[in-house]
Image: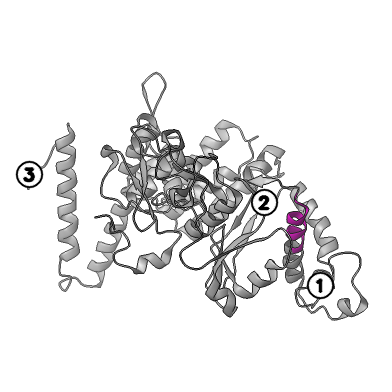
Amino acid sequence: MATATCSDRDGIIALLDEYEAVQDKLAAVQLDALNTADMLTVLARRENLARKAPVLQHRLINRLAAEATAEELGAKLPRALAMRLRISPADAKRRVEEAADLGPRIALTGEPLEPLMPNVARGQAEGAIGAEHIAKIRKFFTQLPVSVDFETKLSAERELARHAANLDPEAFRKVADRLQAIIDQDGTYTDADRRRRRGVTLGRQGADGMSPISGQLTPEARAVLEAIFAKLSAPGMCNLDDETPCVEGAPSDAQVKGDLRTPAQRNHDALLASGRITLSTGDLGQLNGLPVTVVVSTTLKDLESAAGQAVTAGGSLLPMADVLRMASHAHHYLAIFDGKGIPLHLGRSRRTASPGQRIVLYSRDRGCTAPGCTAPAYQCQVHHAARDWIDGGNTNIEELTLACGSDNRKVKPGGFQTRIRADGRCEWIPPPHLDDGSPRVNDYHHPENLMAPDSEADPDG
């Protein structure tokens, strides 16, 4: 096979074709002739190649970040990568950030600059430093206090790259932790450092409905929680096992003595109680036209049978027993569907959707209807999908849909267009230069549709 040049577009595409052809040949090769040593050698060389692979990716992503507009990409760069490469938004964000650290840069004057982490980038290009090493190195620098001087950071990057090229990830982690302790022996973290590291993450909901929670609290946030826990997680307080939990005043002796919860369980129940108290005050105002509250949707069949699960406007599942209990509290909405929905028509009488329409949309669409978007209903606006309001569209439930702010702004002349299909689903039509055959409807919030082979078919023909 002739070696292609990469001086022009055709040469680059030819090289890619050649690379894919070799990959296919390797994948199909028979391995019977290899002994144990040979197989280990092949695995080591494949690992080396895999570590080098992101180098070209960094260059491409940095070029896109510097030259391509959101309109050309169809979205901001991380979102565009997630859609085009069919990867998670978190993975797309990580790739963009890694490219910024490890890829070549261009100065404002146009001159080329080396990567922010030149030694790590060189080790990756040589296949000596892998993804686990890089993740630890990037975490190392995010945890360094801002007071650490530039020269010390340069020296640390050089040392980390040297050790990463010679140690396995676990041994390297110990070296990195030791180096961090040496650099910041006195723990000189500032308020800016703590604010940079703050965060709380709700993990994915498991099959049992439970969700992990993790994060880092600032000293102030911890102090606030300590005060809440001191009151609401005391023995006998806010006990979900009690028929009538004590949420005000002091618990009775019987409630205290009968409290068999662990401290962690008491903290959980205290968080739940404090959340309920906050929602019940009504002081949080509105979110996208509705009072800040818990919105759940279910079918009439499940409600009457007191079985199954409802869906919250945050995209989580809620057992029916919890739905019935929550429905008895004030400031909670319960939208009941018979399977077809409840049509609500306002015509041209108003531009914005009514609270009732929003509840229907929360239940029907569950989140942003743009393909690939994972934003739940709480994070969405109401969009005139059949025809925009300024073009004579009606504020009728069958012409409306949910869209996050980012996707809503993509609908404009020369950009994306939306329409409502005959089956009631919202279809997002990309501009010609972005139309690569990707899905035009979003099944993320309706996983049940993924089991239907014709869920993407256009019922209008």
Q: What residue is disc 3 on?
A: 2
Q: Which residues are magenta?
A: 273-282
Give the SS element for disc 2. loop
| Circles 3 and 1 in contact, beta carbons < 8 Å | no
Q: Residue at x 92, y 77 (%)?
A: 253
At label 1, the amino acid type is Pro
Q: Amino acid at mark 3?
A: Ala
Label 3 to label 1: alpha-carbon separation: 78 Å
- Name the amino acid, label 2: Val
Of badges 2 and 1, the one in the foreground is 2
Residue 274 belongs to magenta span: yes
Q: Which is nearer the N-term, disc 3 or disc 1? A: 3
Where residue 273 sits, quadrant-wise, is: bottom right
Outermost residue, left side: 1
Disc 3 or disc 2, which is closer to the eye?
2
Kindly identify which residue carries mark 1. Answer: 245
Residue at x 29% of width, y 51% of height? 438
Specify whether residue 6 is in view: no
